[in-house]
Image (tube, helix red, strand yellow):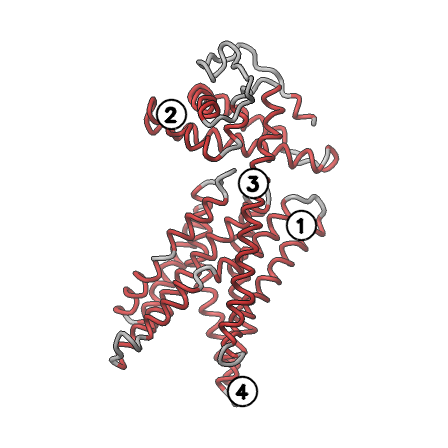
Amino acid sequence: MCVLVTLLTATGVAILELVREQTGTAGFFVGLGLALLPVPPLMAAFRWLGRAAPGPWRQLLFCFGWGACTAALIAILANSFATEWMAAASTDPSAADQLGSVAIAPVVEESAKAAALLLVFVFRRRQFTGAVDGLVLAGFTATGFAFTENILYLGNAFEEDLAKGTGALDSVTAATFFVRVVLSPFAHPLFTVLTGLGFGAAALTARRTRRTGLPLLGLALAMGAHALWNGSSHFGEYGFYVVYGCVMVPAFGLLLWLAVRIRRHRLRAVAAELSVYAAAGWLSPAEVPALASMPARSLARALARRTGGRPAARAVSRYAADAAALALLRRHARRTGPARRDPDFAERERELLHRLWLRRATAAPALARAAVLEDLLPPRYVPPAGSPARAFVPAARRPELSASSA
């Protein structure tokens, strides 16, 4: 962990200084301010997609930092070296620039961004429970990368405006801002999400060939989409608009639909798997529908905050996150079967159950009450005496979980 923090810090300082040298101090700060604008909405959108089973914030911030610092530094240095080398070897510098943007930049940039996903996939495998995790991590990584790249482009555009003394109508800065921040802030996330989906699919399979092949397939698709986007300006006067309208927008809509569908499927899986733990006595029946409903979770946090303040609300959030992680862990173990099951499954299951038990006294009453208020329970459901839907009384018996052998 210390090594990664040191690496991100060092590359962050280096990339900031490199960008400042290329844009000038004034251009750097103008670019920084404008490039910040799309970051919060993009991060919020990707966080929303992963809320069904949220990962830790430090992991998301690592991916953002990797994209903004390490991947951006690798891309700038490698792209500059490759372009200069091709320009020196070619008699047409413009052709070298075009080839670099279409053939070199997509490979370098997507590989640099994919490295963050690979690190999480290898060293934090528990956090990869499906396609949504890959999508969210890829989105944060690409958002960080686009942030640094936008500083460079916007800063250079501002310096060009200063040098030429252009007015507002002819402003290169305004045109660059419109294209990169208003029109296509989702471009880099769209590319890298393809790689993330590959890693997410690989996390659900036990076959080695698929665990290797699926991420590589996603990376290849990301590189191809990136190359098409970079090459659109060379396809004629209207090439950019054709690629944007006929490829990028439909692809973005398709991935958005897929992400929402996967999110709903994940919530249904949470309900199905947690019902087994409810039957074993670890959860009350009223908690299960609340844990599988995002509005009910939000309401439960609000109810807990009224009675116990922010600590109680955080307890509900962590309880819901651990319950979702437990459900997805069991789903993965059930799908892979006993022969290919993760050897740490039982230990991880016990760990999550223990964490649920520690927070149950705070979280269970709020979740059960939220299920009642959201009308998620069967019409004739009557909470049993002592259940959280009435008043939580800790269970005297903690049954051994039969799901461990499921």
Residue 245 picture location, percent across and down: 52, 67
Q: Amino acid at mark 3?
A: Arg
Mark 2 vs mark 3, foreground winner is 3
Q: Amino acid at mark 1?
A: Arg
Q: Are marks 3 and 1 in contact (CB under 8 Å)?
A: no
Instruction: First in sequence, mark 2 or 3: give its number.
Output: 3
Instruction: First in sequence, mark 4 or 3: give its number.
Output: 4
Instruction: First in sequence, mark 4 or 1: give its number.
Output: 4
Instruction: First in sequence, mark 2 or 4: give its number.
Output: 4
Q: Are marks 2 and 4 in contact (CB under 8 Å)?
A: no
Name the residue located 35 percent from the left edge and 69 percent from the top edge.
154
Task: Identify residue for label 4.
Answer: 90
How far apart marks 2 and 3 lie (CA) works out to: 25 Å
Which disc number belongs to residue 264? 3
How far apart marks 4 and 3 lie (CA) works out to: 52 Å
How far apart marks 4 and 1 lie (CA) works out to: 40 Å
Instruction: First in sequence, mark 3 or 1: give its number.
Output: 1
Q: Amino acid at mark 2?
A: Ala
Task: Identify residue for label 1.
Answer: 211
Bin the neighbour count of mark 1 within 10 Å (Cα to Cα): few under 14, some 14-19, many 20 and up: some
Out of 180 and 104, give the one closest to the viewer. Answer: 180
Q: Quadrant of the image for the C terminus?
A: top right
Residue 152 picture location, percent across and down: 37, 68
Q: Amino acid at mark 4?
A: Ser
